[in-house]
């Protein structure tokens, strides 16, 4: 099966196929699944025979579970409800949002230059900052960096105007979100020192504005930087600090995921599962996000992305493959356009590692090469995940020409990243 072949083996709904795949990956019978469902429920369930009949109908796609059982099924499989039973996003396009403020870009810029700052101007700037954060997954890094820096200068320039206290805090927050985005883009491009300076500036803006979400994401970025640099204890420390500052918020889910990734690389499977469960419990309580494209929104599909990384590292190849295919499915629109290319690249690397472990060198190299291509990539993250594949190829296939050629490609990519640092 090709890596980008979505989880589609028949005409059943995607959620029905996911339920079966989750069960089969664990090598459970349907009776085993029913027993697990009962064990995870906090209240008594119907007798096993009745549940088994329901389970068969769910897997067949003949009937969809109600909200209670949807949540319980997700809990049983260690994920969040919307990862198995996704809901459509109600977000309108960026142009429609901007037009809803009654301004185009030229008018917005003229308002920014005015002596007074109206609420309509702030609304339009908020939409612009949101648009930039939504373009992170696919816009070429260099282009996004230039545009983001230009808007950050415009936003911070407003701080010299006549502002109310509320407007001052709003502008500080807008500047903080754009600074967070720029720190991510700079780090993606290998500009490590610039990225850390931008991250600290974003943290300062968040503190001055009293914005806990921005502060939490600044610590999440510190955890991410530490993870890609191999400072695993630093990841855990940064994540714990961020969770303490912004508990119960969307960023706390991603902070827990960074802890899970660090514990997986340390080799402590129990702590991986505890960290994933910590994030799952928070995400399950949050409302479904309106805007799935915003980089600083943790969508339910991203939970599969977190789990994929952890289970690959602890050697759970079946579950890692399942989550990798779900990541690819959720990150690709019905027309086959990759909406989250960086997630897809890491999913392909996961499938490549699994193929290499299974002895399929040709597939491992093919998937690895595909993961390294594309204009939109995060070099530190890509190199971190590809290092698992390169280590495997060196250990098991060091004399094979295909492996040697791929290792040369990764070395060239790493050298380019080092030149930009």
Image (cartoon, rainbow, N blue to C red):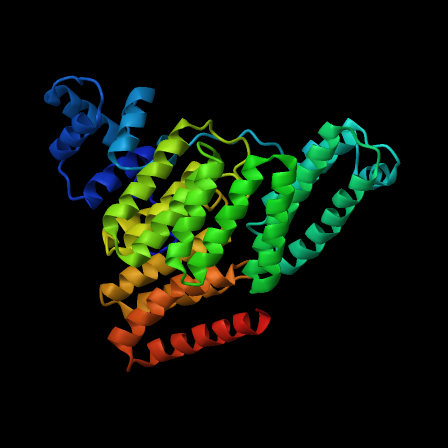
In the depicted view, which residue is nearer to us: 8 or 224? Answer: 224
Q: Residue at x 44, y 60 (%)?
A: 228
Q: Is residue 98 visible?
A: no
Left or right of 211: which side holds 158? right
The correct choice, above or below, for 144 with respect to 210 in the image is: below
Left or right of 96: which side holds 83? left
Q: In the orientation shown, which residue stands out farthest toward the right?
A: 115
In the depicted view, which residue is nearer to us: 216 or 292? Answer: 216
Q: What is the total number of numbered labels drawn onto the structure image?
A: 0
In the depicted view, which residue is nearer to us: 37 or 264? Answer: 264
Q: Quadrant of residue 205?
A: top right
Q: Is residue 208 visible?
A: yes
Residue 416 x, y percent position in the rendering? 54, 73
- Quarter of the picture containing the N terminus is bottom left
- Quarter of the picture containing the C terminus is bottom right
Residue 135 x, y percent position in the rendering? 61, 47
Residue 237 x, y percent position in the rendering? 41, 50
Q: Residue at x 28, y 37 (%)?
A: 78
The correct choice, above or below, for 205 with respect to 382 in the image is: above
Q: Residue at x 47, y 42 (%)?
A: 242
Residue 160 x, y percent position in the rendering? 82, 41
């Amino acid at each position: 099966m090709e890596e980008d072949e979505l989880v589609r083996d028949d005409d059943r709904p995607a959620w029905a196929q996911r339920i079966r795949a989750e069960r089969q990956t664990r090598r459970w019978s349907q009776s085993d699944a029913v027993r697990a469902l009962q064990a995870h429920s906090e209240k008594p369930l119907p007798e096993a025979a009745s549940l088994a009949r329901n389970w068969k109908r769910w897997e067949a796609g003949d009937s969809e579970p109600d909200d209670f059982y949807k949540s319980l099924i997700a809990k049983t499989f260690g994920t969040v409800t919307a990862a198995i039973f996704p809901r459509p996003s109600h977000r309108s396009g960026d142009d429609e949002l901007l037009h809803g403020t009654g301004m185009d870009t030229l008018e917005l810029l003229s308002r920014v230059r005015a002596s007074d700052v109206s609420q309509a101007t702030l609304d339009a700037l908020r939409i612009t900052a949101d648009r930039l954060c939504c373009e992170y997954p696919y816009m070429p890094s260099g282009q996004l960096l230039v545009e983001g820096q230009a808007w950050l200068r415009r936003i911070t320039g407003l701080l010299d105007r006549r502002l109310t206290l509320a407007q001052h805090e709003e502008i500080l927050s807008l500047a903080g979100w754009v600074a967070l985005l720029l720190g991510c883009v700079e780090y993606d491009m290998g500009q490590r020192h610039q990225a850390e300076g931008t991250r600290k500036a974003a943290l300062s803006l968040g503190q001055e504005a009293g914005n806990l979400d921005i502060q939490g994401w600044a610590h999440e970025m510190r955890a991410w930087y530490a993870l890609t640099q191999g400072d695993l204890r630093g990841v855990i420390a940064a994540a714990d600090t961020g969770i303490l500052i912004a508990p119960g918020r969307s960023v706390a889910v991603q902070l827990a995921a960074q802890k899970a990734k660090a514990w997986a690389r340390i080799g402590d499977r129990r702590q991986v599962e505890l960290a994933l469960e910590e994030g799952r419990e928070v995400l399950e309580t949050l409302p479904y996000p309106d805007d799935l494209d915003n980089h600083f929104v943790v969508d339910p599909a991203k939970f599969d992305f977190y789990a994929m990384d952890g289970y690959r590292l602890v050697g759970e190849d079946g579950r890692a493959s399942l989550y990798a295919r779900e990541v690819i499915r959720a990150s690709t629109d019905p027309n086959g356009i990759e909406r989250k290319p960086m997630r897809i690249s890491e999913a392909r690397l996961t499938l490549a590692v699994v193929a290499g472990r299974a002895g399929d060198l040709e597939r491992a190299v093919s998937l690895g090469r595909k993961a390294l291509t594309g204009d939109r990539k995060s070099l530190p993250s890509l190199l971190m995940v590809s290092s698992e594949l390169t280590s495997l190829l060196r250990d098991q296939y060091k004399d094979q020409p295909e492996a040697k050629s791929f290792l040369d490609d990764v070395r060239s990519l790493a050298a380019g990243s080092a030149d930009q640092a």
